[in-house]
């Protein structure tokens, strides 16, 4: 499962002010996550691609360029299961970012000066992450995948080896192999030799777009 | 969805309005024609009649005068209407002026006929109106037209001069006001934020590690309160709407300054030339007039030989004076006179010379009489009027040059004013953003860090470490605030290509930003710091809006030189069109605040187009 294994919980923290970034990263680490730090919107998007975070903790204002919300939306095109916690000094973020009028599922918003303690952040993170593991995602072809399968499909598509995937998920290589086998069956690919289905699966991931089945609004 | 009041294509009523204005202006000067001509006619007739009456010793001229006045009034109206119609229907200054002269002649001739008839009816004899009087009327009205033109010039020029002085004063006052306002800002930031921070740092410095635990809660509380109750409102106040610091700047100057210099240029171009036909016709008239009465005056000379000699000598002197005078006049205005005009000037000078000399001669030979002297005075007056017409071109040219340079100076000051206010706005925004984003955020986080170790389970080392970290960061915040308060207006030259490349790089994963501009346009912008900075600001804001409001994935930025004063920036995106927040002004307010004219439309094939006009006066120096 995505967010259960202790060693597999990863978070990306993006904040342009260094002191605040250090503070927030420390707090998120304190909640048991492996933290990657990013200094800008672009940096965050690039790191997310390789880091494969389960959680994104993003300051809304990241300087010139994409905002924290832009980062969340962009990252979720690839990783719709990622939980998001947005921080900012604005009490009403939709005043500057109208799309935040509707946060959507698995997204929390914290006003920085209302953080009383680490507990505030922990509660927000829990609220955001809760239920991400149970989500199901469908490809354009109509095939439905569990969150775990979708995540592994993505890792395969980005060239991760089975060993790397095993480390990421905190399980054995054999577990990964059997998960992949089941995945290929779901996708309708025949496992003649190990390589070809992998390539096809990669293409399926990059061509298609994973969406949660009940949300049909065309989120780009 | 439009900002300021400019549109990219003018509505039809605006050009019709302008045509009407031009026609009215011409009408106003045409009226001078008519009034001048008819007035002159009337004056001449009155004088002539009075003299005749005096000679005849009758007193019925009063009735005739009254009748003439009425006739004059009626014909003035007819003449005025005729000239208005001419102004409206004829294009081309030459044709228009010729037609005006024609109308005046017709009106004057009608007047003459009416006069003759009335005089026969009321006084019993014709008071003849020779052709020359009609032509006199033409000359006088043309001179009046010229005088009117010149007066308009002077008015416009002094208008511009006043505005120039005003603007220079305002600019100076603004510079001072801005210094004062910056000083106030520094004071406020110091008093409201830095001092409190220093207090907390001092309290941390002077506490022993053993006392930390008891101090943590009050410190955290103070920091949090500072963030919310002091820094946040301060950042709103500084970055808020059209802050009052440069309050003396006239917003119309700033908002309209890109169009100001164009408007003044239009005024300068609109001041008309006196037409070619006018000086030529008047010159010919006067010449013939003078020659005719001069010939008449010499009628009695043919007899005496000695008188012929005297006459010849007098003529010689007259011609000599005329040549000297003509050369003096011609050398003063050499450039703007055509060869034809110069010839007439010369002949004119000769005529003036004769007109001066002949009464002297007449007195010398004892043939002086008042009516004749009157004719001579009129001739002289007409000669001067013609001279004015011929040299009118030169006067107009010099006036135009003076106006143009005044207008340019005014435009330059207006530009400086506008740039200055924009720069100020930019600084305030930077300060406000820093306060809101960094200072407030850091203070909140510092508060959280302290609250975290405000726990009996935390070890002494953890507490000490936390206090250390917070103290360091507070010191850094104080330093940053000091730097911020002294933020100077221009922070170095703008690397246009670099800035745009950075922008593109920042958005690369979210939205593709491409630039479509000719190298010439980019060079032009690069040469002007203020425009380059504006362009980068505008493009940055526009891309943010396109992504934020339209979820765009591709944005194309096109730059075009819309006019010598402006560059049009057009941003097309492939998003979902213009949402209600965008349409209601979110995101575009900064353009309006900067005094830029913009327009936001949804494109028919999806996406949106934002057009912003950036003022860029080519005449400004590269240092901005």
Image (cartoon, coloured by chain):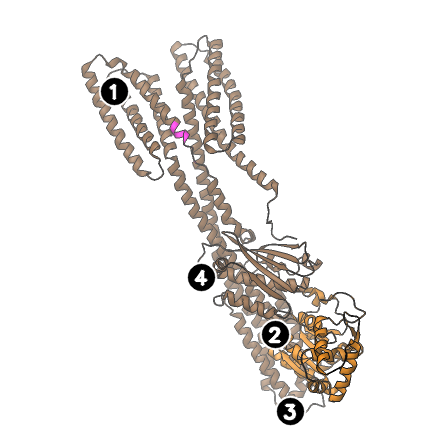
Chain colours: A orange, B brown
Check whether the beta carbons of the residues at disc 3 and disc 1 lie within 8 A of each other: no
Q: Is residue B230 left or right of residue B488?
A: right
The magenta segment: B272-280
Counting residues from the start of the chain, the first of labels 1 and 4 encountered is 1
The numbered mark 4 sits on a residue in which chain?
B
Q: Tell me the distance, in whole angstroms, between the alpha carbons under discs 4 and 2.
A: 33 Å
Residue at label 2?
B439
Sort mark 4 into few (<14), some (14-19) or many (20+) by Cα contacts within 10 Å.
few
Residue at the far top: name it: B124
Query: Residue at coordinates 27% horizontally, 14% vertically from top-left?
Result: B299
Residue A21 on image: x %, y % = 63, 79
What is the distance, in whole Å, between disc 1 and disc 2 at their CAs? Answer: 98 Å
The disc, 4 or 3, on the residue closer to the chain's N-terminal end is: 3
Q: CA distance from mark 2 to mark 3?
A: 27 Å
Is residue B586 shown in magenta?
no
Q: Earlier in the sequence, mark 2 or mark 3?
A: 2
Are labels 1 and 2 assigned to the same chain? yes
- Quick check: do tags 3 and 1 share a chain? yes
**Horizontal and vertical percent position of residue B463:** 65, 88
């Amino acid at each position: 499962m995505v967010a259960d294994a202790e060693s597999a919980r990863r978070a990306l923290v993006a904040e342009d002010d260094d002191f605040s970034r250090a503070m927030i990263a420390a707090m998120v680490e304190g909640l048991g996550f492996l933290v990657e730090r990013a200094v800008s919107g672009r940096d965050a998007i690039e790191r997310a691609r390789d880091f494969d975070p389960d959680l994104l903790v993003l300051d809304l204002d990241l300087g010139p360029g994409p905002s924290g919300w832009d980062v969340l939306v962009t990252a979720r095109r690839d990783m719709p299961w990622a939980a998001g916690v947005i921080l900012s000094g604005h009490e009403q973020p939709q005043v500057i970012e109208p799309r935040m009028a509707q946060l959507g599922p698995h997204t929390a918003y914290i006003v920085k000066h209302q953080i009383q303690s680490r507990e505030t952040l922990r509660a927000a993170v829990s609220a955001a992450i809760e239920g991400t593991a149970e989500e199901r995602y469908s490809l354009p072809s109509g095939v439905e995948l569990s969150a775990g399968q979708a995540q592994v499909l993505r890792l395969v598509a980005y060239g991760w080896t089975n060993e790397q995937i095993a480390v990421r998920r905190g399980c054995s290589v054999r577990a990964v192999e059997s998960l992949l086998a089941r995945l290929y069956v779901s996708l309708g690919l025949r496992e003649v030799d190990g390589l070809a289905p992998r390539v096809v699966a990669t293409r399926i991931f990059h061509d298609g777009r994973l969406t949660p089945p009940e949300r049909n609004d065309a989120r780009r | 969805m439009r900002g300021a009041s400019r549109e990219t294509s003018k509505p039809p009523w605006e050009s019709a309005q302008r045509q009407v204005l031009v026609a009215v202006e011409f009408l106003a000067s045409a009226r001078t024609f008519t009034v001048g001509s008819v007035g002159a006619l009337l004056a001449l007739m009155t004088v002539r009649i009075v003299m005749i009456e005096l000679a005849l010793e009758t007193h019925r001229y009063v009735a005739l005068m009254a009748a003439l006045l009425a006739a004059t009034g009626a014909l003035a109206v007819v003449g005025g209407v005729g000239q208005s119609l001419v102004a409206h229907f004829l294009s081309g200054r030459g044709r228009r002026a010729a037609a005006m002269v024609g109308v005046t002649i017709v009106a004057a001739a009608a007047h003459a006929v009416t006069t003759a008839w009335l005089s026969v009816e009321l006084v019993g004899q014709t008071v003849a109106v020779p052709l020359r009087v009609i032509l006199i009327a033409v000359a006088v009205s043309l001179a009046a037209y010229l005088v009117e033109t010149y007066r308009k010039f002077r008015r416009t020029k002094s208008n511009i001069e006043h505005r120039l002085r005003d603007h220079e004063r305002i600019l100076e006052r603004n510079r001072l006001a801005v210094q004062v306002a910056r000083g106030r800002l520094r004071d406020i930031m110091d008093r409201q934020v830095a001092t409190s921070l220093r207090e907390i740092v001092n309290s941390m410095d002077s506490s022993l590690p053993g006392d930390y635990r008891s101090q943590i809660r009050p410190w955290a509380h103070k920091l949090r309160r500072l963030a919310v109750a002091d820094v946040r409102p301060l950042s709103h106040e500084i970055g808020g709407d059209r802050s009052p610091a440069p309050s003396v700047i006239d917003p119309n100057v700033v908002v309209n300054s890109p169009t100001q210099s164009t408007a003044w240029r239009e005024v300068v171009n609109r001041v008309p030339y006196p037409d070619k036909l006018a000086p030529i016709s008047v010159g010919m008239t006067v010449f013939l007039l003078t020659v005719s009465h001069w010939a008449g005056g010499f009628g009695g000379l043919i007899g005496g030989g000695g008188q012929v000699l005297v006459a010849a000598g007098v003529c010689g002197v007259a011609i000599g004076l005329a040549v000297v005078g003509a050369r003096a006049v011609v050398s003063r205005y050499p450039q703007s006179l055509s060869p034809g005009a110069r010839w007439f000037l010369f002949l004119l000078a000769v005529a003036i010379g004769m007109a001066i000399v002949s009464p002297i001669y007449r007195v010398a030979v004892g043939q002086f009489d008042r009516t004749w002297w009157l004719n001579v005075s009129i001739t002289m007056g007409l000669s001067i009027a013609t001279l004015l017409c011929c040299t009118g071109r030169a006067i107009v040219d010099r006036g135009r040059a003076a106006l143009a340079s005044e207008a340019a100076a005014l435009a330059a000051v207006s530009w400086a004013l506008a740039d200055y206010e924009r720069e100020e706005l930019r600084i305030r925004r930077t300060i406000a953003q820093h306060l809101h984003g960094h200072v407030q955020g850091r203070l909140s986080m510092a508060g959280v860090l302290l609250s975290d170790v405000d726990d009996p389970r935390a070890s002494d080392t953890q507490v000490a470490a936390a206090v250390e970290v917070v103290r360091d960061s507070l010191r850094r915040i104080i330093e940053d605030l000091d730097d911020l308060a002294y933020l100077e207006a221009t922070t170095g030259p703008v690397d246009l290509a670099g800035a745009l490349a950075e922008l593109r790089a920042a958005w690369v994963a979210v939205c593709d930003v491409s630039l479509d501009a000719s190298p010439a346009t980019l060079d032009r912008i690069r040469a002007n710091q203020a425009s380059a900075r504006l362009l980068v600001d505008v493009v940055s804001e526009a891309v943010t809006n396109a992504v934020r409001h339209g979820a765009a994935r591709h944005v194309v930025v096109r730059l075009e030189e819309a006019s010598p004063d402006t560059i049009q920036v057009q941003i097309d995106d492939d998003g979902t069109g213009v949402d209600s927040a965008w349409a209601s002004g979110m995101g575009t307010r900064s353009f309006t605040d900067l005094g830029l004219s913009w327009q936001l439309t949804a494109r028919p094939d999806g996406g949106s187009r934002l057009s912003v006009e950036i003022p860029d006066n080519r005449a400004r120096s590269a240092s901005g």
